Amino acid sequence: MENILQVKDLKKVFHQHGKRDVTAVENMSFSLRAGEILGIVGESGSGKSTVAKLITRLEAVTEGQIILDGQDITHRKGRALKSIYDKMQMVFQNPVGSFDPRKTLGYGIGESLKNRGVPKAEIRKKTANLLEQCGLEASYMDRYPHQVSGGQCQRAAIARALAVEPQIIICDEATSALDVTVQKKVLDLLMNLQENKKLSYVFICHNLALVQQFCDRVIVMKDGRIAEEGIPDEVIRNPKDAYTKMLVDSVL
């Protein structure tokens, strides 16, 4: 399978006024194949979410290169980002906070279609279809974020990510704010969508057990670097790095 995303020697330094610089990500290289689910695990502060923000260009890259579908997107800004977001979308940890509280879920899901000049009637039809694909009734398009549960809101956030028919979805702790039963339902949904639409995922998570059941490959991050990578079962059964072993022991 071809690589749809390549990250080469990625580095991110945060410059803080009057304080020491903080290196959040360093010497980070990995690839994502078409149709693959890649897990990135590590404790809070390990640099996982910074990697997600760098890949999706929500943060500027200090050093390194990001290649998406053969195109170098490392320093793209402004309007040049549109073609990136056609191919890659993000689902955030806090689903309610990721929607505008003054707008309906349907508005949030259809906004990217509106920006692409899709007619109003077609947007409504497509939004209803996306909600149904994500296990919600079409009527949810007229509800506001505070009127639905966290799990329902995360399904709507996944519907929003699917609106532009991306190739890659970056899930940044997308299930961590949900209780265990809702978490399982959202993971099942992501798995079904992946099979039906041949999506690729970068699944950022602090829960190794979830990564083991969901991901094809895993990267373990510590202090902004890759500590270990491999097939989840192998990494969990036979961790080579002391930090990975500690993470495994904390789950078992």
Image (cartoon, rainbow, N blue to C red):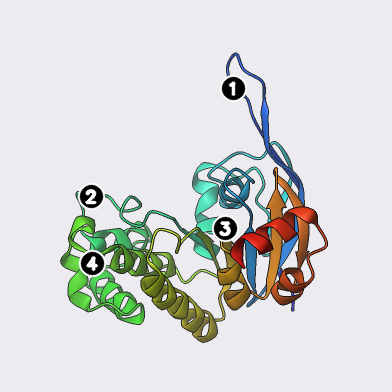
Query: Residue 224 in the image: x percent, y percent?
Result: 70, 44
Q: Residue 244, located in which quarter of the rendered image?
A: bottom right
> Which residue type carries mark 2?
Pro
| Depicted 252 relative to depicted 227: above or below | below
Q: Which residue does the numbered mark 3 point to in the structure image? A: 206
Query: Residue 107 in the image: x percent, y percent?
Result: 25, 60
Q: Which residue does the numbered mark 1 point to in the structure image? A: 16
Q: Return the disc, 2 or 1, that comes first in the chain's sequence.
A: 1
Cα–Cα span, label 4 and label 3: 40 Å
Residue at the bottom extreme, as displayed: 196
Any mark on residue 120, and which? 4
Q: Which residue does the numbered mark 2 point to in the structure image? A: 101
> In the image, what residue occupies the spot 47% across and 84% down?
192
Nearer to us of marks 4 and 1 is 1
Viewer-proximal residue among 141 and 180: 180
Cα–Cα span, label 2 and label 3: 28 Å
- Residue 5 shows in this picture: no
Residue at the right extreme, as displayed: 240
> Which residue type carries mark 4?
Lys
Crowd rating for badge 3 (residues with CA inside 10 Å; few <14, some 14–19, many 20+): many
Crowd rating for badge 4 (residues with CA inside 10 Å; few <14, some 14–19, many 20+): few
